[in-house]
Every structure is written in C-alpha cells, then in structure tokens.
Image: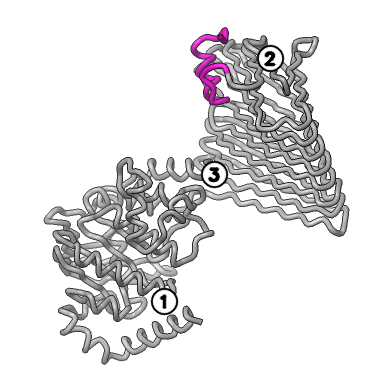
Amino acid sequence: MLELRNVSFGVEDEGEKKEIIRDISLTVPDGALTVITGPNGGGKSTLARLIAGIERPHSGQIFLDGQDITDMSITDRARNGIGFAFQQPVRFKGIEVFDLIRLAVGRKISAADACEYLSAVGLCARDYIRREVNSSLSGGELKRIEIATVLAKSPRLSVFDEPEAGIDLWSFRNLIEVFEGMRRDIKNSSILIISHQERILNIADEIMVIKDGRLVNRGTKDEVLPLLMSTESAVRECTGINRRETAANA
Amino acid sequence: MLEMDEIQKRILSEVAGLHEVPEGAYNIRANGVSAGRASTENIEIIPREDGQGLTVKIKPGTKRESVHIPVVMTKSGIKEAVYNDFYIGEGSDVTIVAGCGIDNCGDQDSQHDGIHRFFVGKGAKVRYVEKHYGSGNGKGKRILNPVTEVFMEEDSTAEMEMVQIKGVDDTERTTKAELAAGAKLVVRERLMTHGNQRAISIYKVNMNGEGANADVVSRSVARDSSYQKFDAVLVGNAECQGHTECDAIIMDQGRILAVPGLEANNVDAALVHEAAIGKIAGDQLIKLMTLGLTELEAEEQIINGFLK
C-alpha cells in the first residue's frame, strides 16, 4: 500500500514560488486499480513523479507498505517495488528493446522470455525485440514498449503517467485490454494510472480527482464518474479527447 | 604456434578477437617482428624488404576470405612506422582485420604509426576492421597514428569500421579516399577517450566519379579531461552523394571539436553533414534508474549502447 501524508511541492517560476501539489494525503490500496484524474495542469503528473522519486516533496511524507520512502532515491524506490511508465517515453541510441526489458527484469533472460512481455502489449515480438529504442519507433510503439518494461519489472506498485497520451485509437483499444489483463492478475500488487480517458476510468476500483494541486474528490467509479461528467472541466477534457481521437483516425 | 607471451595473447584477443592462429591469410607483428605469417592460394602476404610492413595481394574474384594483420606491442619505448599496401583484385569480396594493441608498463612512450594503402579493384568489396587498444600502468604514453589511404575503382565498395575504446593516450588518425564512378565508401568510427587522452580524426573523401557515394559516421564519448577533434571533409567533384555525421557525448571536463566540411564542385553533388555534441540526457538516466539501476550503472548502459 502506498500512502501520502500531507505532501506539498512547488517550483520557482521567475522568482515566484508556484505551488503545484498542496497538502495531499491519500492511500493507494493493494489489489486495486486506482485512477487519478483531473484537469490539465492540476498536478497529476507531478504527483506521479513524486511517487517515483523523480521529484522530492517540500513537505510531507510518502510510505510504501509502511516504510518511509520520502528520502529514498529513484533507484532504491525502483528496487523496493515501484514501477513507473513515462508519459513521454525516452528514446536511446543503440539500446535495443531487448536490453530495456532485460534491465527491467533485472537478471539474465532469454529473448523468448522478453518476447512474452512484448506480446502482452500487443507487439509482434519478433519484429521488435532487436529494434533500437530510437526515433525509428512511432509514439504508439514506444508507449507500448514503455508499458512492457513496467510489466517486465513486475512491481508491487505500477504507476502509469497518461498512458493514452500520444497514441492512436487502435493502440488505445489494445492498451485498455492490457490494463484489463493487469487488473485481473493484480493479486497483492497495485496499479495507479494517471488518465483522462473514460474507458480507463471505467475499469478503476477507485478514482481520485486532483485539481489545483489538491485532492478534491475520491470514491468508486459509480460515485465519482457521474459528478465528473457533469463538471465543466470534465466536459472540456472529454471534448479534447474526442478531438484527439478524431485526429488520430484521420 | 605463435611465439607470443600471455600479455601479447591477451592484447591480440582485444584487437582482433583472436585466441589462436586465424583461418586464412595472416601476419601477426609483435614488438616489431613477425610472430607468424601465412598466405593462401588467393591471398599472398609479402614482407617488405626493410621489414617495416607488408604487401598484401588479393587475386581477382577471391570471395569470402579474410586477412588478419594485428600488431601487438608490449615493450616500453618502441617507436615504429609500418607501411602496408593492399591490392584487392577485381570482383573480390574479402574482410581485412587490422588493429593495434599496446601494453606499456614502462616509462618510455610506445608508438605505432601504421600507414595503410588500399587499392580496391573494379567491383571489389572489402570490409576493413581496425581496433585500437591500450593497457599497462607505466608512465610511458601509448601512441597510435594511423594513416589510411583508399583508392577505389569503379563500382567498388569499402566498409571501414574504426574502433578505439580504451587506453590509447594519443592518436591522430588520417583517412583519405578517392572514389571513382559508382564507388561506395562507408566509415563507422567509434571512439571513447578518458583521462588526459587526445584523439584526432581527420577524413578527406574525394568523390570523383558519377554515382560515387560516401557515408562517414562517428560516434564518440569524451570523458574526464580528454580531447577529441573530428574533422571530416567530403568533396563532390561529380554527381555524387555524401553524408557525414558526428554524434558525441561529452562528460566531466571532456572537450570535443567537430568540424564537418563539405565542398561541392559539381552542381549534381548532394552533400549533407550533421553534428551533435551533448551530455547524456537526464531523462535517459531517470528512465534506467526507474528500472532499478544506479546513476553510474545507467550511464554505463547508455554509453555501451551508444558505442555498440
């Protein structure tokens, strides 16, 4: 279980301190899929980065299974069971898909083992395993490989930062299946997804809404979704998504 | 059997991937003298009269054969210049593996200057691999100054892989090529310098015939206080295509100067250069750290991949 206690974070912007996360306390329970949603610029991705250790809170504490990980490095958090999928996956010259998956698993594996993770995200493993993780891969391909690295790590807590961003509709359908599969096999681990997408919100056990750096609502999807759909910001979000999907289909 | 000690054998495996006598034609030079040589029916290796080099003659039409000519130096204070000429017969398809390794445990400088000339016949295809390696704890420097000249006849192909990853203190590499019509030259250089090392790579490629094609690409990493200079000039004297690229990672107090140059003397010459120098991207390090690697391990993976 992940717990945030009174976490705050801000940045200096042209000499002015700008608060991005304001005194957030929440828990992400085991054996559940939790989705954090809310308007753009509300602090969702920053929260995900605080959990992975990429940013450090200015105040407050973060606990993983009761252990205080607030001052733990990215590496140590990863070794203690946190997996993180970037919103914009990183490209590398010369590093192959197989290398990334091998590093994620953390021990020597065969190409056949690595292929399983690629198949799980809907990529024809044979075509990708020896590809370089460079600009020759499309956004959708990179996104799926990013998710495969988190699957390969099999963390206790998987954090996905806007997995739907930048991918086409076909990839998106496949992505939902991947998350549905992960939801089925969740056992004692937990999944935290930052998302705007209704279909992802629909598979959530719990939805949390972050706005202006604060946790403004949380509950089951039946409790939160109707409220969310009736607010002005959600309408704006959904319109944006529809526009993106239309563009992706064009 | 080769008359070599264990250090020489270790260096031989670093530069040429050889553990024993290679198949095909070979000449292994250790501390200034030949430690073993063999010719084949199609490939003749003739020592020069002054002992300082070889003439390698490859018969026209020779296919899928190889020549190994590694050099190892394990005595401190040796300074030598070696002249090797390769005549690659028309229509042949061969691999030449050169390379030089220096182990200098003494206080005097060790220096090997290899001057290689390639005469690539019509339609011939040659793959040339040259690795440089240095080891040893002495104060003496390990110095390598290779000069490579490539004369390519019509429709010939040369692929050259130049690798220097470790331990060479000072190197000045000069490569010149003359390409006739339809000739294709591909150069892949991989370089890593550290400590106070200095590495200079100079390329000058003249594309003289219609349809000539040159692609010169360097990937390098400069660490500690090392210095690198990449100076590649492509000259288009006919309808031709040329591309040169320097892609470099800089670390610590390393310094890199990239000077790509293009000269078009014909309206149908199409020449492109690219150069990029920068430190390792922070998000690359972070991604690998989120997989459980330390920052140092992440850095190592990124560099290994980059230089692969």
Q: Chain of mark 2?
A: B
Q: Is residue B20 magenta?
A: yes
Kindly give the residue lying farthest to the left in the view shown.
Answer: A66
Specify whether residue A138 is in view. Answer: yes
Residues flagged by tags 1 and 2 on a common chain: no
* Residue found 70% across the figure and 49% down from its top: B244
Stretch in magenta: B1-21
Residue depth check, mark 1 versus mark 2: number of the one nearer the observer:
1
Expressed as whole percent of the image width and height from the top left, the position of residue A102 reads 35, 46
Q: Nearer the viewer, residue B92 or A72?
A: B92
Q: In 3D space, how far apart are the residues under numbered discs 1 and 2 (Cα atoms)?
A: 66 Å
Helix or strand or loop: what does disc 1 sit on? helix
Residue type beneath disc 2: Lys
Judge whether residue B139 can be spotted in this image. Answer: no
What kind of residue is marked 1? Answer: Leu
Residue found at the far top of this picture: B3
Q: CA distance from mark 2 to mark 3?
A: 31 Å
Give x and y (percent) for residue B249.
54, 45
Q: Position of residue B43 (x, y in %)?
A: 72, 22
**Image depth: mark 2 or mark 3 in front:** 2
Tell me which chain the residue with mark 1 is part of.
A
Is B156 placed above or below A92 here? Answer: above
Residue for badge 2 = B79
Number of marks: 3
Residue B14 image offset from top left, x and y in percent: 53, 25
Question: Residue B146 appears in which quarter of the rendering?
Answer: top right
The residue singled out by tag 1 in the image is A169
The numbered disc on residue B250 is: 3
- B18 relative to A185 in the view: left or right: right
